[in-house]
Amino acid sequence: MSIFLDKNTKVIVQGITGSEGSYHTGRMVLYGTQIVGGVTPGKGGQRTEHGLPVFNTVRDAVAATGATHTCIFVPPPFAADALLEAHDAGISTAVCITEGIPVHDVLRVVGTTRGMRIIGPNCPGLMSPGKASIGIMPGQVFAEGNVGLISRSGTLTYEVVDQLTRAGFGQSTCVGVGGDPIIGTTFVECLREFANDSQTEALVICGEIGGSDEEDAAAFITEHMPERPIVAFIGGRNAPPGKSLGHAGAIISGSSGTPQSKIAAFERAGVPVAERPSQIPGLLRACMPAAAAAR
Amino acid sequence: MNLMEYQGKELFRRAGIPAPRGTHVRTADEAADFVAQNPGEWVLKAQVLIGGRGKAGGIKFAGAADEARKVANQILGMTIANRQNPQGEVVKSLLIEEKLPILREAYCAIAIDRATRRPIVMASRHGGMDIEEVAQQHPDDIAKFTIEVAIGYSAFIGRELAFEAHLDPHYHKTFPAILAGVYDVFFKYGAKLVEINPLVLTQDGKVFASDAKVELDDDALYKNSELRTWQKSLPLDEDEELAAAAGLGIRNFRRFDGTVGTMANGAGLAMATMDAVRNAGGSFSNFLDVGGGANADLVRSCYELIINNTKAKALFINIFGGITRCDEVAKGIVRALGETQARKVPLVIRLTGTNEEEGRNILARAGMTPVQTMDEGAAQAVSLAA
């Protein structure tokens, strides 16, 4: 098993004929993801360079293909609308890659699309190694295994995954939850899924400054999964207060969102916090049962 | 983007939030003329984005035209600095407002609550104090209500908060309507924060927004051409200006005091790179996320951005090739360094991921030896900058 997607998941791409959408569709297809079509209004009836059918609306695409998941590459002014359309058409999981969506648009969407899981926005997507990928993660650094990973960033995730893979730790599912202040799926919601996933025996949490997602995750771990081997990392320990660095959500506001608070919360939950990404495999090995670490 | 007080109050007026009578001026002559034509007691307030203007002498009173001229001359042109921004900000204009006979000061605001993913309205009877301070000293005195976006604001929310925050009963009648105005500004202009601190109750029982703090969402500015015009009148954050000029997003570059320049692809990796420099015992001169398409032109402009604007004595370039291919980045680095006129500093390059071998070969042919890991690269850059 894996969480959020597996090799049978049927996926459409919203914005499939745009440059980003078409490039990454090719990569997802190559990885083995069941991309069953895409949506570009006005281009319905055409086929993409990969031979995939293009539809005018998500409703048409879902009716014709049975897709349950969507990957959204549309530009920021149209992204909220794309998410609402996906929800209306009965999509169960929407991965939104788009960066720079107005925060009020995101508030409106997450507040009104109950029943649809949104990953992101401003995220690299989902990867269940060996099975499927939705988004823009580079397949070649991943390997299938029993470590789940959740992260607020893109390249830092690849860095951590690369170290895990090289150290012999494969991954069950990697979730890039996104770098914005308001996101559709938080660390806690990912943990809830991972807690019930038979493939996932250990977890890595790549947090960063800003917000309270890490503190909430630590509280959830204490209550619901205290025995699970988990290692954390917090990026931006040396960032100044009041200024966001790259990610809109990576900002210390007053006394909230500081690295000290996040590190302390994880340590209270018995989760070792790596000072640098290179320490993560070693910490994981130390807290995993030998048999599980060898799998 | 933060608005100046006078701009925030313009939005308040449109939403029906009562603000003191007054005018916005740019010269001492205008200030004197206004007071001459409108006899009374006035307060002249420096229009700056930086905090701490009161303590710095940026708020003064005047009761006559010549006094207004004198005070305006003192404030206009002065530089107001604080701990976060030691270079400070020059005062270019003043808001002149009637001096209020203050009986009480309260606080109200609406912001975006990340934890609940909803707008949150807050009220407190400790007006005129920094809300962070109130949160520390009197955490139970801040009344809060999270709003369901699909439903929006309704007057009962204001009534509940006024009681719960123990506001002076004289606030109760107007408070729900004032909060409606605050929500209106928040919603209509896509704000991240709308704050009235203090919300003044006068001795004759009237309520006024005595200050206005409005933080808008940069990502939403495309929706409103008027606000984009206002943006041009605001003092620019120098780092943001430099980032934009170099072809980067405004959040992708920030300067610091250290001596090791850093460049990485992706914000998370760029932050981790700064942390790695600190872990290696050094100090970083900047944050820089070069983004996904690290081509030669962009690498060059980023190199020049760091070298020309920071105290970097060495530069650590940390690239993880995911979608970005290492050979492309390597070509970019070689070309950028060949073309740039900027001063040369020792360079440490870490390249790993997609097409790593090809990338390393390109660098080797140009006489550069990349390092294998982030920790190793940070340590080398720190020792080269020492």
Image (cartoon, coloured by chain):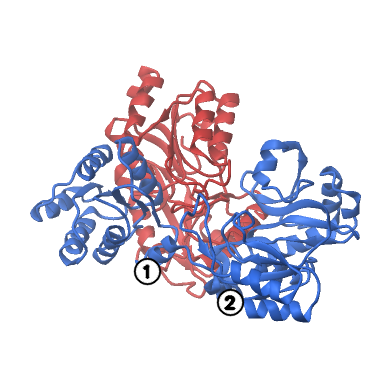
Look at the image and tell me whether residue A288 can be seen. Answer: no
User: Which of the 4 quarters of the picture holds residue B226?
Assistant: bottom right
What chain does badge 2 belong to?
A: B
Find residue B245 and name its label: 1
Up-down relation of residue A226 to residue A154 (above or below):
above
What chain does badge 1 belong to?
A: B
Mark 1: which secondary structure?
helix
Q: Which amino acid does the dot numbered 1 rest on?
A: Ala
- The foreground one among B165 and B385 is B385
Q: Which amino acid does the dot numbered 2 rest on?
A: Ser
User: Which sits earlier in the primary sequence, circle 1 or circle 2?
Assistant: 2
Crowd tier of the residue under label 1, counting other residues whose Cα lies within 10 Å: few below 14, some 14–19, many 20 or above: few
User: Which of the 4 quarters of the picture holds residue A36?
Assistant: bottom left
Mark 2: which secondary structure?
helix
Which chain: blue? B
* Residue located at (18% from left, 50% from top): B346
